[in-house]
Amino acid sequence: MDKIFYPESVAVIGASEKPDNLAAGIIRNLIAFGYAGAVHVVGLRAGQVHGIPIVASVDALPDGIDLAVILTPAATVPDLLAACGRKGIRWAVIESGGFAEFSEAGRELEEKISAIARRWGIRFVGPNCISVINMENGLCLPFARIQAEAAKLGPVSVLAQSGGVSITYLILLSESGLGANKLVSMGNKADLDEVDYLTYLLEDSGTEVVSLYLESIEEGRRLLELAASSSKPIIVQKANRGAASAQIAFSHTAALANDERIVDTAMRQAGVARVATFDEAVALAQGFSLPPVNGDDLLIISRSGGHAVVAADVAEARDFRLMSVPDDFLAEVRSLFRADVITPTNPLDLGAIFNFDLYSRIVEKSLHELDPHALLLVHTYSAGPEAEASRRLARRLGELSRELEKPLAFCAFAQRDEVEALKAQTSLPIFTEIEAAVRALAASRDRRTHPARLLPLPSPSGDRLDKVEALLAPEGVLSLDAALDLSAAYDIPVAEWAVVQDVESVLFAAGAIGYPVALKGLSAEVSHKSDASLVKLDLTNAEELQDAFAALLVALREYDADPSSRRVMVQQMVSEGHEVIVGGRRDPSFGPVVMFGLGGIHVEILEDVAFRLAPLVREEAERMVDEVQGSRLLYGHRGQPPADVDSIVDVLLSMSRLLVACPEIEEIDVNPLIVFEGGGAAVDARAIVRRQKT
Amino acid sequence: MDKIFYPESVAVIGASEKPDNLAAGIIRNLIAFGYAGAVHVVGLRAGQVHGIPIVASVDALPDGIDLAVILTPAATVPDLLAACGRKGIRWAVIESGGFAEFSEAGRELEEKISAIARRWGIRFVGPNCISVINMENGLCLPFARIQAEAAKLGPVSVLAQSGGVSITYLILLSESGLGANKLVSMGNKADLDEVDYLTYLLEDSGTEVVSLYLESIEEGRRLLELAASSSKPIIVQKANRGAASAQIAFSHTAALANDERIVDTAMRQAGVARVATFDEAVALAQGFSLPPVNGDDLLIISRSGGHAVVAADVAEARDFRLMSVPDDFLAEVRSLFRADVITPTNPLDLGAIFNFDLYSRIVEKSLHELDPHALLLVHTYSAGPEAEASRRLARRLGELSRELEKPLAFCAFAQRDEVEALKAQTSLPIFTEIEAAVRALAASRDRRTHPARLLPLPSPSGDRLDKVEALLAPEGVLSLDAALDLSAAYDIPVAEWAVVQDVESVLFAAGAIGYPVALKGLSAEVSHKSDASLVKLDLTNAEELQDAFAALLVALREYDADPSSRRVMVQQMVSEGHEVIVGGRRDPSFGPVVMFGLGGIHVEILEDVAFRLAPLVREEAERMVDEVQGSRLLYGHRGQPPADVDSIVDVLLSMSRLLVACPEIEEIDVNPLIVFEGGGAAVDARAIVRRQKT
């Protein structure tokens, strides 16, 4: 993909001398950004654009061109792309709009260009994008005017589904002082997609941090497995939150499984930092440019007591610990105060030190002698005499931070011009809001203390059991006995049961299982059996059992016309214990997802649930249980016996195995799993089988 | 208080020629900000400061000085303040630190200056502050250097507990383009406090919006009643969140009543907009400078599809509705597109219009013809040819917004310099982050759609009932019968009961009440009776009753040595229904607070509770019930009968009356109140009486 980011020659197709010609903007940007490669122009009318002569056709171009950039009406793109193919051009950027994003005819056109590209071995960016900027070589291919002065070379590369957003990122990253490396506006991703670009950027030597702006995630699993394997920090701004959640609806588990919650879970599992705003993305990139934060001990130094209080609030909210500072250090600092009116602690309020050199020495001393995992300096100052001293301080701290490998978030409060001047003077990122600085430190810490825990999805065949083949053969909703058999096959404990069709077998089975028992009428047509009158609980003797069986056979008539297909489950009653739900679903983008929640109102009314992508490791399964607020009930509440939480964790791991081994399972709920002091037992389950298209 | 903000003459006490003298900074600031009144200087050594001669003592000052500004070591302040008193100076600003914030000795010194001030009728700002800035007349009294160029006159006044924060607000408000009016750094508030300043600012003609930065709220009730009565928007940044919540601990209700949750509730009730960061405060002030947002219908216009998606997400999160745009309007817009590649809707993506005049006309047309409650314009542009057109657009929209009284949030994405230039060209506030713009519009809307609903606290005597006097006479924990009597006195329905001491009375009472009954041993020493073995439930006949009574008498021996004081309550069993908790507490800052939650795990484990300051109006009581997530259970879930929610609302209103009428009640819980289909009944209650100091 080097040809896209480092082409030696570019042909811009669609330019003209007309003042409102869009493709001419591409040439203007290439010149403004100092692109040194050869630039050719193809257009319908003769003439020249920014001094470059227009040739009339792709065929008229010289041979050996690395990259074609096409910005012409959508209908003309197929022929032009084919011409590129004939000319031996193997890489293209298609900026034109009017494809799948616009209409059915556009979608067909998009398929057509994909086919042409495949035929000629062309890989392409877009369509419907403003394409690629590489700050390293001045390759600036958007048609929209971009001010070269506003763009700074730096370590952050950006993948954005939106062209406008990619330019906003370029400006914000540049103005933050950090700078951008490579930016791609991916458009419709008809060929190359975020996984392709990310693969490239993770190997790219100029890229140290990658920030993605996404409106949809189709290949979520691939993207996140890639991210999880990366040593470079990855930031994701995922938009289209409202619409996404509204579009998808599943029954029960899935209805709760708001897509966005899975996106959140998946990103955390992959060690990806999710952000909500542009500013937050830039702040995190700033934080990732510092030495890593290896723990929770934070030292806050401030020249303003109020800013120190705000910083302490924010630090607590982000789970930092205000490290305790040794008394002798504090005593020494106090001895330096101009007026003895502040008692030093952490946050270290240096408001009583008006001598800037002294103040700077204390900050340096703190970095040297104390050993915080991170230092937050909230530096309020004014233009005038404090300005030069502040710049000196920022320069010095930049050197020191690198030398000592200590992360230092420098948060400057002064006039904007002054802060801008400060940025130009130091290698440190300069923050201008305390919340942003602490958020950035926290993201850096989280990468260390909660590393990626997203395992690659193993092959289903690895853990496929022969006995499940028959169960998974039919499509649709599994019957209760099949769902329980499937669960049991993957070591999920189930209450003892038997399926019978006549009264003698009922009595025999109940005798074998032991009273009390439950009876459940089986029918594939009713998925929520408790809503129908097909369940009879707590039958304590043969008489009750016979009556209940007779009633069930009557009720089953509504579902099954054929008496021989009316079946009844006799099941051990498990009434003592905590009801929990263990579920699974197959997310279209992220693959198998395990769900955990407490039974009854906890899931249905309070939506107190946790999700994780499978395969699960034990530690993540334990975290799932802890994440659910109601789980505190499992440890015994007001005299109730505690539940065997380890056995829940076992079931979550079993569910994960099941989902991985059986890709036909679209959705499964063990609900409830009743958990008591020494284990648990599933008493109800449902599953939906959907054969995948091959 | 005009003398503090508009003095005709100021004496600065504590200045000298020494280069590091702090008080000299006050004089420098007064000159830099163009203060036109007379400035006098008092100092120990002869000389002059910025051309003003130093006089040796307060006595040597001319008569008739309006305001003294003192910045000398704390120990010298009492004498200097007394000297001011003798000189007839009645208003002072004490900037010195080293008082109550620092040490016990400092606290005594602070009491001393308060006493001196009272003796001489002096009102003062501080101590321990950087005091007052009035942008209207250049009165700039902080000792820290402030750049006059960085400060812009505008409609927002600021009250800040921290001096550094007040300067940060000054800079941010000025750079936002909005500007500041009056700023007070209040310091220790030994005399004048936020209620005094706010009272002044709400009458001040130059102040249109007030923003407060507070680290503690002592007079929360007075402050919020004042805020609730104001027509000017009020913004509060309340810091010191972590520490505050950790310091206070109460049993049960109070333990859940995290102080910060009451702060949140109280502010919402008072119609105050609470913010978390400086930037958010400034964004809200910008929003309040627009015509008010009268509803939820939002129109979003953007030149970038990506920014439009982000805006739609944020709008949905802030409960805006994307208004539907008539087809003929959309058709007309579409006919103007350069390339027909975008289908217009709301958000209206005008990315396909490259002609700026046309684009501007569509925005204007939308304001004129559509009738959104607010318009969010996300305007991405680049320096160069688009810059002048963008400024023209911003100017024109500023006029139009005022003319049509339509709020328009102009969110600009361009290079920083360009955005700065834009701000100077328009009366519109310019936002630079979509989240901030939508947050600001939402705050303006919330002021309209959720106006303040904090009623003044009426006099207890208004609703005081004779029959409660005896109940409230003793201090400490009330016995169950007293707590139920108190509840019943204020119309909270209670299960029928009688208190007995011998077995004949037990049998008689149970007969009168009707079986089944409960027995409860009464003792002031046990507050959570269900934890002891003093409760016997569901006694269905005389035999069970007698056995239970005998057992209770034995159990009561542990608590009451005197047999004659062992008492037992016979109570009607109310077992069918939903358990809820209605509580009350007296918050030290905000006064009486009503609490609502569901029983059992909902309050104790899930912390799913709602609070409101009393007195409650019915609509707020209804909102309390709705706010509790578990309340959905009350409307009937999986076949359970619904609860009489109206009767819960009645009890909340009764609890509010009780708390207002009985200020001795420090804490009270009706727990549980059992609510069924046709009403409710309290079966347990506890209350703590604490006589207030008079």
Image: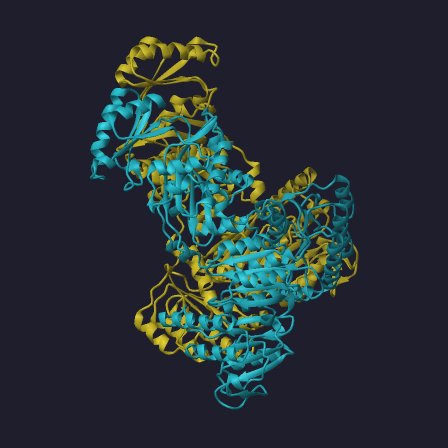
Chain colours: A yellow, B cyan
Q: Point out residue A654 in the picture as x, y percentages from the top left corner.
A: 35, 35
Residue furthest to the front in view is B466
Relative to B442, is A493 above or below?
above
Residue B19 vs residue B100, the one in the foreground: B100
Closest to the observer: A541 or B263?
B263
B231 left or right of A75 in image: left
Q: Disc count in the image? A: 0
The image quadrant that residue B667 belongs to is top left
* Relative horizontal placement of residue B148, taking residue A497 as reference (left or right): right
Quarter that holds the N terminus of chain A: bottom right
The image shows residue A54 at horizontal and vertical percentages of: 75, 59
Q: Is residue B80 above or below residue B303?
A: below
Horizontally, is A88 left or right of B160 in the view? right
Q: Which one is in front, A636 or B56? A: B56
**Could you say which quadrant of the image residue A377 lies in?**
bottom left
Q: Position of residue A171 (x, y in %)?
A: 60, 62
* One can see residue B600 in this view: no
Q: Eyeballing the image, is B378 above or below A675? A: below
- Seen in the image, is B553 located left or right of residue A85? left
Task: Estimate the x, y position of residue A612 in percent, counting from the top left.
Answer: 42, 41
Residue B678 vertical position relative to residue B128 in the rendered view, above or below:
above
Q: Residue furthest bottom?
A: B46
Residue B368 seen in this snapshot: yes
